[in-house]
Amino acid sequence: MALPGYAFFKGRIVPYSEARVGVLTHGLNYGTGVFSGIRGYWNPDEKELYVFRPEDHYRRFLESARMLGMELPWNARQLSGAAAELIRAEDHREDCYLRSLAFYGDETVGVRLHDLTPEVSIVAIPYGRYIEKEEGAHATISSWRRVDDNAIPARGKIVGAYVNSALAKSEAMRAGFDDAIVLTQGGHISEGSAANFMLVRDGVVITPPITDNILEGITRRTVMELLDKEMGVKVLERSIDRSEIYVADEAFFVGTGVQIVAITRVDHRPIGNGRIGPIGTALRDLYFRVVRGRHPAYQAWCSGVYGGAAAREKTAMRPAEPERTAAAR
Ligand SMILES: Cc1ncc(COP(=O)(O)O)c(C=O)c1O
C-alpha cells in the first residue's frame, strides 16, 4: 500500500512522515484507542468526491472515545471539516478511505484509562474493494466468539477489540474462506469480522439487534432505511440462530469497508441457490447510487469535498491546536 502524503495530526495537516509516535505510546501498548473508517466516493460526472455520512461516523467516533473516558476537543462537524481538508491536500480524485484514530498518546507504562491525554490522527488513502468477491463471498462460522459488552464494548470501535476481529478474519482466510461470521457467547449470530450481518427469509430481512454485541454500524442503519423506504422490504431486528443461515434465501455483510457483500455460501453450504439473490442485487445497485451522490433523496448523506458544503468548512481546528497541545504536554 502506498503511504499517504499527509496526515491530520496534533490539530493540523502535516506531511505523513511527521505523524509519528514513540514505541512507549499508551495506545500502541494497551490498545487504548478508538477509530473510524469512512469512505469517499468519486463521482466522475460531477467531478466531486463525496464522503459518506462523515458526521454520523464522527459522532460514533466521539461516542467510542467517551467509552474510553476520552474528552476530545472537537465535535463531529469539525472532524468532518478536517477530513475534507485532508482529502483536498491529497487531491484524491478517486474512491478513497479515511482512517481516523483517537489514542492515548502518553509515553508511559501502566494500564489505565485515567490521567492520560488523547491524540487524534486522520489519513486518507485511495481504496477499492475490501472483500474481492462482493457478489458471492464464502463465509465460515468462526471458532472465535465476539467480545462481550461486559468485556470490551463491541458497540464502540475500540482498537484493542480488533484483535478479536483479526483472529476471526485470519482463521477464516487461512482456511480458504473470504470472511468469518462471529457468534456471541450465547451462540447467536453477532456479525462479521468487520461488518454487520443480515439475512433474508421469505422476503423479510433479519439482522441481529445491537444487544447481540455488534458495532452500531452506519451502513447497517443506512441499509435498513433504504430497504424500508426505497425497496419496501420489511426489516426485523432480532437474534438469529446459527442454523437459520442454512435455511436463509440470501445473506449479506454490510459495512463501510465491505460495502454490501452477498454471502452465497457458508461452510460449503449454498445460501439460497448459491448465487446473489434479488434483494442483494437491488440493494447493491441502490447503495452504490446513493453513496456516489446519484440519488437526490439521499444527497444529504454525501458530503462534497471539492465544491460542496465541506469545502467551505475550512477546518476550525487550527486555532484550537496550540492551546490544546500546550495543555496536553
Ligand atoms: C466489527 C465491525 N462491525 C461492523 C462494521 C460496520 O460498521 P460501519 O457500517 O459503521 O462501517 C465495522 C466497520 O466497518 C466493524 O469493524
Image: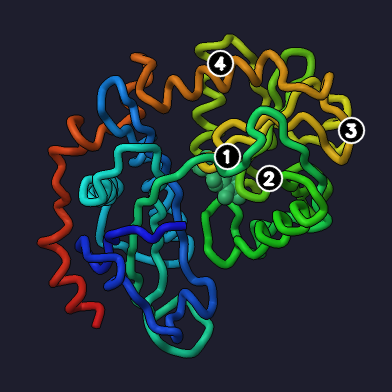
Q: Mark 3: few, some, or many residues within 10 Å (few <14, many ≥20)?
A: some
User: Could you tell whether 4 is left or right of 77 in the image?
Assistant: right
Q: Can residue 189 be seen by looking at this rendering? A: yes
- Displayed quadrant of residue 10: bottom left
**Cα–Cα gap, marks 4 and 3:** 29 Å
Q: Of tags 4 and 3, which is closer to the observer?
A: 3
Q: Earlier in the sequence, mark 2 or mark 4?
A: 2
Q: Amino acid at mark 4?
A: Asp
The residue pinned by badge 3 equals 269
The three-letter amino acid code for the residue at tag 3 is Arg
The three-letter code of the residue at mark 1 reads Val
Element at label 3: strand
Q: Earlier in the sequence, mark 2 or mark 3?
A: 2
Give whichever of 277, 1 is nearer the camera: 1
Q: Which is closer to the viewer, label 2 or label 3?
A: 3
Disc 3 Cβ-to-ligand 1 distance below 8 Å = no
Depth check, mark 4 against mark 1: the one in front is: 1
